[in-house]
Image: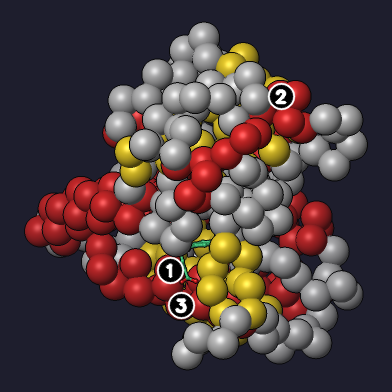
Amino acid sequence: MAEILDGLKVSKEIKAEIKVEVEKILEGKRRAPHLVAILVGNNGASKAYVNSKVKDCEEVGFRSSLLKFPSTVSESELLEKIDELNKSKDVDGFIVQLPLPDQIDQEKIILAIDPRKDVDGFHPENFGKMALEMDTFLPATPFGILTLLERYNIETKGKDCVIIGRSKIVGRPMSILMGRKDFPGNSTVTLTHSYTKDIEEYTKKADIVITALGDPHFLKGDMIKDGAVIVDVGITRVDDDSAKGYYLAGDVDFDSCAAKASWITPVPGGVGPMTRAMLMKNTIIAYKTSVYND
Ligand SMILES: Nc1nc(=O)c2c([nH]1)NC[C@@H]1CN(c3ccc(C(=O)N[C@@H](CCC(=O)O)C(=O)O)cc3)C=[N+]21
């Protein structure tokens, strides 16, 4: 029976550590770190995530601003706002919640963000630095997974790690990070995706499986080996007749995998809260390295 990689617990520890740092900053009579989130449109899940980020900011003592735009906003309007945030001396970092409506070129938006304020770590300059093992903002979800593995002392060196899904914000960067030379890395990485002939062939041999595909209960116990470490990034709202009208489903079939794995992340309470904690971490890093605070 697997032990739980408790992302909710670790995320609280990290936020408490950040809070202590913020208190020291304020004692030094400096302004608090300031994170801005841009939310476009009315997507229920996006709204929920952004609101929880605002709550996290309050919890650690950051200033936060939520900028809402209608789904009809033009690309140039958004670019103007980004330019303003790039220049603003009292904004340390900002994120543009994805996905964006079709009339907006996501690539253009990400390229417009000043890499020094790109606390999501999505700008190609930061992605490149990540790949080259240079100091930079790591994308929050992969950063959260690494931190979770680190805090539980999960050995990754020399392990076979299989990642399912090659998204720009999770699978792809995760595949790079797990193979990096620094801890927790040094794994032998296989990145599987929709064109992989037989995913099971890989997952069955893997010491570590990281699923990020958004397909509820995809990974079953008979697809993994005994003692594997299972990290579930998937989080899909599945309609049901509960009070909320939905439940949150991971990519992992929890019961059958937990029966075989050595460690496993739950959904909710695993990677999600870690993602949020790492955004706070990136924001305080941005604050400390900001040219305006030295
Ligand atoms: N620019 C941008 N940056 C992001 O980091 C980003 C984004 N766009 N778009 C959407 C995804 C998704 N994402 C999540 C964050 C927290 C939870 C989270 O805290 N989940 C809770 C459950 C929350 C609930 O109850 O709905 C949990 O797993 O326990 C989930 C998903 C960040 N994303």
Mark 1 residue CB less than 8 A from any atom of ligand 1 = yes
Q: Residue at x 69, y 38 (%)?
A: 164
**Closer to viewer: mark 3 or mark 2:** 2
How would you rate the neighbour count of disc 3 (Cα within 10 Å): few for under 14, some for 14-19, many for 20 or more? some
Asked if the residue at tag 1 contacts the one at tag 3, i.e. Cβ–Cβ closer than 8 Å, the answer is yes
Asked if 27 appears above or below 127 in the picture, the reply is below
Q: Is residue 119 visible?
A: yes
Quick one: SS at disc 1? helix
In the rendered image, residue 160, in percent from the top left (x then y), is placed at 59, 17
Label 3 sits on residue? 51
Quick one: SS at disc 3? helix
Asked if the residue at tag 2 contacts the one at tag 3, i.e. Cβ–Cβ closer than 8 Å, the answer is no
Marked residue nearer the N-terminal end (2 or 1)? 1
Marked residue nearer the N-terminal end (3 or 2)? 3
Q: Is residue 26 left or right of residue 284?
A: left
The quarter in which the C terminus is drawn is top left
Which dot marks residue 202?
A: 2
Name which residue type carries label 1.
Lys
